[in-house]
Every structure is written in structure tokens, then in C-alpha cells.
Image: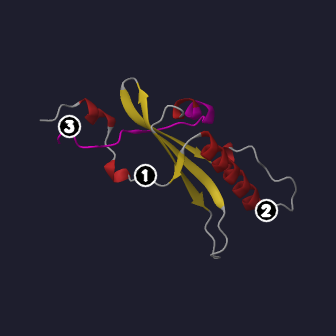
């Protein structure tokens, strides 16, 4: 492998949104990927979670990718009444989160190609 080849670093998943946003501010690129509830109806597109990637974060001289997944488990939104559809509440919460991400960062909606990932230990091996 030549040194001029481009590659992406290791993914580190963080469970704390506060910690993730602290480091994500220094990222070269921010990508978010919404995940949807499965539905038999094509016009029903409700978001169930959002995966965020902060790419190119320097951590102890190593460039890494930070990952955070926003789900209903770590969301503060809950149905106000028994009549409220939980999927609608979760979808509303996730859309608000996406709006927040888009205004805080120069975020792109997309997906990471994990085929280009390499384990972090390879960064320290000298290629000839």
C-alpha cells in the first residue's frame, strides 16, 4: 500500500451525546444517516433513529471517526397521552434532532461505505 492512498480510520462509538458533540465540532466532515420504521405503506416514512458520524476527529495524533446513534431510548420525548402514536412521537423527536444537527454542523445526509475502513493498528505499521 502506498502512503498516497486514502483511507478512513477506525469508528469509535460514543454513548454520550454531550461527549460526541464536544469532539464533533472539530470534525472535518459530519454525516447523519436516518433509519426508518418498516411499513407496508410507501407513503409512511417515519424515522426511528439517526446515526451520526464525525469524520476526521484527531484523538491523540490519530484520525478517527466518532459515531453516535440517537434512538428513542436516549431521547427525552415521550407520548403525552395514550392516544398519541409512539411512532409519531419518535419520528417528531428524530426530525427535531436532524434539524438541530443540520444547523449546528455542516452536516450531510448520507451513509458510510464501511468497505474503505481499516483497523486502527494498521496506521502504525510501516508499508513498503
Q: Residue 3 carries which label?
A: 3
Residue 3 sits inside the magenta stretch: yes
Q: Does the residue at mark 2 contact the one at mark 1 (Cβ under 8 Å)?
A: no
Q: Distance between the residues labelled 3 and 1?
A: 22 Å
In front of the other: label 2 or label 3?
Answer: 3
Disc ID at residue 126: none
Dot label at residue 112: 1
Q: Is mark 3 on a helix, strand or loop?
A: loop
Which of the 4 image quarters holds residue 86?
A: bottom right
Q: Which mark is residue 85?
A: 2
- For the C terminus, the image quarter is top left
Towards the viewer: 2 or 82: 2
Q: Where is residue 69 in the image (x, y as percent from the top left)?
A: 57, 45
33 vs 7, left or right, is right
Residue 7 horizontal/vertical position (percent)? 30, 43
Tell me the SS state at disc 1: loop
Figure check: 73 above or below 21 = below
Magenta stretch?
1-21
The answer for how far apart the CA atoms under marks 2 and 1 are is 31 Å
Q: Nearer the viewer, mark 2 or mark 1?
A: 1
Amino acid at each position: 500500500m502506498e502512503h498516497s492512498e486514502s483511507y478512513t480510520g477506525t469508528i469509535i462509538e460514543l454513548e454520550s451525546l454531550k461527549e460526541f458533540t464536544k469532539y464533533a465540532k472539530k470534525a472535518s466532515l459530519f454525516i447523519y444517516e436516518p433509519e426508518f420504521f418498516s411499513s407496508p405503506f410507501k407513503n409512511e416514512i417515519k424515522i426511528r433513529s439517526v446515526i451520526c458520524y464525525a469524520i476526521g476527529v484527531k484523538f491523540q495524533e490519530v484520525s478517527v471517526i466518532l459515531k453516535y446513534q440517537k434512538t428513542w431510548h436516549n431521547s427525552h420525548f415521550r407520548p403525552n397521552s395514550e392516544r398519541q402514536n409512539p411512532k409519531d412521537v419518535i419520528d417528531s423527536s428524530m426530525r427535531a434532532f436532524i434539524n438541530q444537527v443540520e444547523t449546528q454542523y455542516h452536516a450531510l445526509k448520507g451513509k458510510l461505505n464501511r468497505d474503505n475502513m481499516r483497523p486502527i493498528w494498521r496506521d502504525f505499521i510501516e508499508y513498503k
